[in-house]
């Protein structure tokens, strides 16, 4: 499947289709019995990259790892910090699953960096949405709509993204809040500071992890000043120690994403304590990442429903647990995007 | 029973306007080139009233348009002839401001600047800052995905809205997004932003607030050619610096700004470049050394750094008033809004100058150089036969150039009425046809703001071009 035409023919060959990338989120790309798995992983390649424009365009099957390496060789990066890069996640899969890493805290998520997309509708029409320049307000923003669509609205063929310059240096540090409540309080104080933090994570024990990024030589004094301002002692962390928060990055041990607000952390955490599930709160407690096996999912699902929270499980089915947002708007756009219900 | 009596059953007479004089105030918007008379104007004060009005329109198949402050520069807020205007400006309460969650829940008629003012005591602000921000509404910002001078680093309105309650043209209520910056499922909220009122009316919006930067560093440099200024921008980008704003103005715009505001721009320069760094103190201190070296290398006629907050404000005043100021030099003008790849800004300006000469008109340029967003300002005198037509023709040629260069027909002002003819050249027939299908999925009877964005039918009456009444009064200025 290396041309839009062959992908389209394959799409139209079956009444039920699930597009897939590399399959790093098996629960998401899982298919219904009798449905066709349409793999985009051979549709690869960066088609345009002009570092001076801060933009690139690549085919959906291109591995994020490849993209990240090419960007890095020009001193640029994907600011939304996608998970599962090393595991082989593809660009199309990243868009369709809409996942972000801890670095989304600084400049926003994937939705804030996608500029354009070429896709096939469920009935096989080739559509181009958005544009290839960093600013564009013409037409409907289909690229954003496809973010989080889980392969259920369209087959993404190609996308254009905005990128940013890599910082010269990064500094990771931790502070102990003593308890979840203490840590949460510190996170909230930090999130109101003009500190331009790259990451701001919290563990259930109340340890606050942060990451600064910027010019060489500026980070230690910034950390020092920040600590004095919020009355906390930050210990710089060697990223190679076993304490490295990257070990707990989403996708590896933590496989369920739950969008959150800081006010709801305490109750969610109490529930997760009862269930004995590992977890971490990211982006100033705007997301919980939870480790759950297939056996844990039913209980987690029930708890999330009670708290009126929803979750996306990447590794084990069902992918959608807890209370999901109303599908009313999605159902409306589906009439145009997938009139035959091929991708539903 | 009639459409009007149904409205009167919902709205008291002082909020249900029917007579000619009252309706006249709603005939046009910031573009002022088009005007149309609505059948009625209602002024809801609750979301229930908005929903009820939309449902009455659905029953009687009457087209409607939500209106914020009417500052649209593309004719987006010109009423549908004989339709209903739903004026949202009385729904202007900030319902909740939660500094801990860094969000504000607002009614759509809230003025953009009011959000930042309310957030200021917590060190927070709402990032999108169109230069109409003292007057335009959040609902209008969302409908047009409005921008401003800070889009390269901070994005547009869509990047700062995290939740919306919407009433669709069939009267259905939709909830999109929520209170978290993360969400589940397709990003329908992202689709709603920038949909120019064609999917329905926003009833309530949840906005993301961010901490105000600790330090600003504003640099002004004058060059003897636009190319040199453009090269300086490229060098800044190549050095991995991400300024909060990078703006360029040409000679005509400088003259006008200087005359209007005495902003102290270099007197002999063909072009001025404004670069503003912002961030934590240590970072800005480091970047400003790097920036100084780049500017030095770029061969400016002169350059200076804002001494203090007042000086910074003066530099920005010149920039922000440029268009209204140029407008005062000419009886009529057209503000154009297009985007080209940033690295081809110099080429775009040369082509615009040549096109202007071909059309025998003057054209001033002010642009957001960081994101390649051009705002050519075409000057003409409508009382001279043929000038208006030539102005329109030139504006169109500039958009064609943007498309040809791989850019966009609008960076922030939207398609509205003005650019309907250019949507298909930019996207192609199949894409536009599909957009229309998506629109019909929300609005099968096409009652919400019909005639906008899509190439179609008749345009409302053309009037003259000129300053927005509020600009004449000196209340707002355009970017
Ligand atoms: C911890 C871990 C364990 C793993 N274990 C195994 C294993 O045991 N066996 C194994 O074979 N692999 C395994 N993998 C690899 C992984 O399952 C696959 O490589 C692959 O599914 C990942 O592809 P992706 O990330 O690009 O997106 P996918 O997981 O393929 O897809 C994510 C979502 O995006 C959608 N999507 C993808 N591409 C598109 C597109 N172009 N257009 C529209 N929608 C699209 C899908 O429908 C799906 O909803 C593992 C990975 C990890 C991280
Ligand atoms: C002097 C001047 C300077 C400007 N500078 C900038 C600038 O720097 N950047 C920029 O991007 N724009 C700029 N603009 C354009 C304009 O201010 C923006 O487009 C603004 O967002 C419009 O807001 P408004 O409240 O006036 O909306 P209106 O003009 O009243 O309406 C605009 C559109 O929004 C729709 N709408 C309004 N409220 C709602 C709602 N609640 N739900 C759904 N749809 C709704 C209307 O139907 C209409 O289609 C400028 C305009 C002027 C006059």
Image: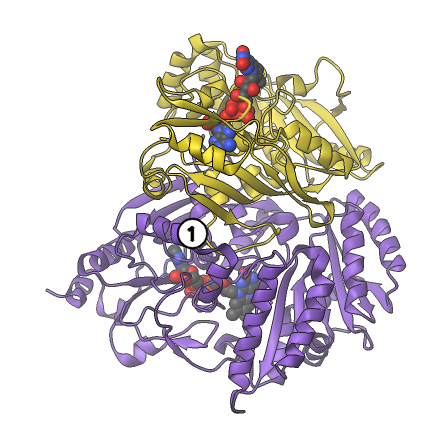
Chain colours: A yellow, B purple
Q: Can residue A261 be spotted in the picture? A: no
Residue B49 percent coordinates (x, y): 26, 56
- Residue under the point 64% across and 80% down: B358
Q: Quadrant of the C terminus of chain B?
A: bottom right
Dividing the picture into quadrants, the one containing residue A51 is: top right
Residue A117 appears left or right of B440: right
Residue B451 position within the rendered picture, expressed as x and y whole percent measured from the top left: 36, 65
Q: Nearer the viewer, residue A41 or B330?
A: A41
Quadrant assignment for the N terminus of chain B: bottom left
Q: Look at mark 1 in the image and give the residue it sits on.
A: B430
Please give the name of the residue rendered at 84% of the width and 37% of the height, measured from the top-left corner: A216
Disc 1 element: helix
The residue at the point 37 percent across, 74 percent down is: B460
Residue B183 position, x and y percent, is 47, 34
The residue closer to the viewer here, B272 or A49, is A49
Q: Relative to residue A208, is residue B50 depicted above or below?
A: below
Q: Is residue A307 left or right of residue B213?
A: left
Say above or below: A86 vs A147. above
Left or right of residue B105, residue B274 in this image: right
């Amino acid at each position: 499947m290396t041309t839009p035409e062959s992908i389209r023919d394959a799409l139209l060959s079956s009444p039920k289709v699930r597009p897939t990338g590399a399959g790093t989120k098996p629960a998401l790309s899982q298919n219904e019995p009798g449905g066709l798995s349409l793999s985009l992983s051979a549709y690869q390649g960066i088609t345009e990259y002009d570092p001076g424009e801060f933009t690139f365009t690549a085919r959906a099957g291109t591995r994020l790892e490849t993209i990240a390496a090419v960007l890095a060789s020009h001193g640029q990066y994907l600011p939304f910090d996608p998970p599962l890069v090393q595991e082989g996640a593809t660009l199309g899969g990243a868009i369709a699953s809409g996942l972000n890493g801890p670095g989304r805290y600084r400049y926003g998520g994937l939705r804030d960096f996608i500029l354009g997309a070429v896709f096939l509708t469920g009935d096989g029409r080739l559509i181009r949405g958005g544009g290839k320049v960093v600013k564009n307000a013409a037409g409907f923003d289909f690229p954003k709509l496809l973010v989080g669509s889980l392969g259920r609205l369209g087959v993404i063929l190609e996308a254009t993204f905005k990128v940013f310059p890599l910082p010269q240096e990064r500094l990771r540090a931790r502070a102990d809040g003593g308890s979840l409540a203490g840590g949460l309080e510190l996170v909230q104080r930090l999130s109101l500071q003009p500190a331009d933090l790259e990451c701001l994570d919290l563990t259930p024990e109340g340890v606050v992890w942060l990451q600064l990024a910027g010019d060489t030589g500026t980070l230690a004094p910034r950390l020092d000043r920040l600590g004095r301002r919020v009355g906390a002692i930050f210990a710089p962390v060697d990223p190679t120690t076993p304490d490295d928060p990257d070990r707990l990055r989403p996708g590896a041990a933590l496989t369920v994403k739950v969008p959150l607000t800081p006010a709801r952390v305490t109750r969610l955490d109490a529930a997760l304590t009862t269930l004995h599930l590992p977890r971490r709160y990211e982006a100033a407690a705007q997301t919980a990442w939870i480790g759950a096996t297939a056996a844990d999912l039913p209980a987690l699902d029930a708890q999330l429903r009670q708290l009126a929270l929803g979750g996306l499980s990447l590794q084990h089915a069902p992918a959608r647990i807890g209370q999901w947002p109303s599908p009313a708007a999605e159902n409306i756009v589906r009439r145009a995007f997938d009139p035959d219900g091929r991708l539903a | 029973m009639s459409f009007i009596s149904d409205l009167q059953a919902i709205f008291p007479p002082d909020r249900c306007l029917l007579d000619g004089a009252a309706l006249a105030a709603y005939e046009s918007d910031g573009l002022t080139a088009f005007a149309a008379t609505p059948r009625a104007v209602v002024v809801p004060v609750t979301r229930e009233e908005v929903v009820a009005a939309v449902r009455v329109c659905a029953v009687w198949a009457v087209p409607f348009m939500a209106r914020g402050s009417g500052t649209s520069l593309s004719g987006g807020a010109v009423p549908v002839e004989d339709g209903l205007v739903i004026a949202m400006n009385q729904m202007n309460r900030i319902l909740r401001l939660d500094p801990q969650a860094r969000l504000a829940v607002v009614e759509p008629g809230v003025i953009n600047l009011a959000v930042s003012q309310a957030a200021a005591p917590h060190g927070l602000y709402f990032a999108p800052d169109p230069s109409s921000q003292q007057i335009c509404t959040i609902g209008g910002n969302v409908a047009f995905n409005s921008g401003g001078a800070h889009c390269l680093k901070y994005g547009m309105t869509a990047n700062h809205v995290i939740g919306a309650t919407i009433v669709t043209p069939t009267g259905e209520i939709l909830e999109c997004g929520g209170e978290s910056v993360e969400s589940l499922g397709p990003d329908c909220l992202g689709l709603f932003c920038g949909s120019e009122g064609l999917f329905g009316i926003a009833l309530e919006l949840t906005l993301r607030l961010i901490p105000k930067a600790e330090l600003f560093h504003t640099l002004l440099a004058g060059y003897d050619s636009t190319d040199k200024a453009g090269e300086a921008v490229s060098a800044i980008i190549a050095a991995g610096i991400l300024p909060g704003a990078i703006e360029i103005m040409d000679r005509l715009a400088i003259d006008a700004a200087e005359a209007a505001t005495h902003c102290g721009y270099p007197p002999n320069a063909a072009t001025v470049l404004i670069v503003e760094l912002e961030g934590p103190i240590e970072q800005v201190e480091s970047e400003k050394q790097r920036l100084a070296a780049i500017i030095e290398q770029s061969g400016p006629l002169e350059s200076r750094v804002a001494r203090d907050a007042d000086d910074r404000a003066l530099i920005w005043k010149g920039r922000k008033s440029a268009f209204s100021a140029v407008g005062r030099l000419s009886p009529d003008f057209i503000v154009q809004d297009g985007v080209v790849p940033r690295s081809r800004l110099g080429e775009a300006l040369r082509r615009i100058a040549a096109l202007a000469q071909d059309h025998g008109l003057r054209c001033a340029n002010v642009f957001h150089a960081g994101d390649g967003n051009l705002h050519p300002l075409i000057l003409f005198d409508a009382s001279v036969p043929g000038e208006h037509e030539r102005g329109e023709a030139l504006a169109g040629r500039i958009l064609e150039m943007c498309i040809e260069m791989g850019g966009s027909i609008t960076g922030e002002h939207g398609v509205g009425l003005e650019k309907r003819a250019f949507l298909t050249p930019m996207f192609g027939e199949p894409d536009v046809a599909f957009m229309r299908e998506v629109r019909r999925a929300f609005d099968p009877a096409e009652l919400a703001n019909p005639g906008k964005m899509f190439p179609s039918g008749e345009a409302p009456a053309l009037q003259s071009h000129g300053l927005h009444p509020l600009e004449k009064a000196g209340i707002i200025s355009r970017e």
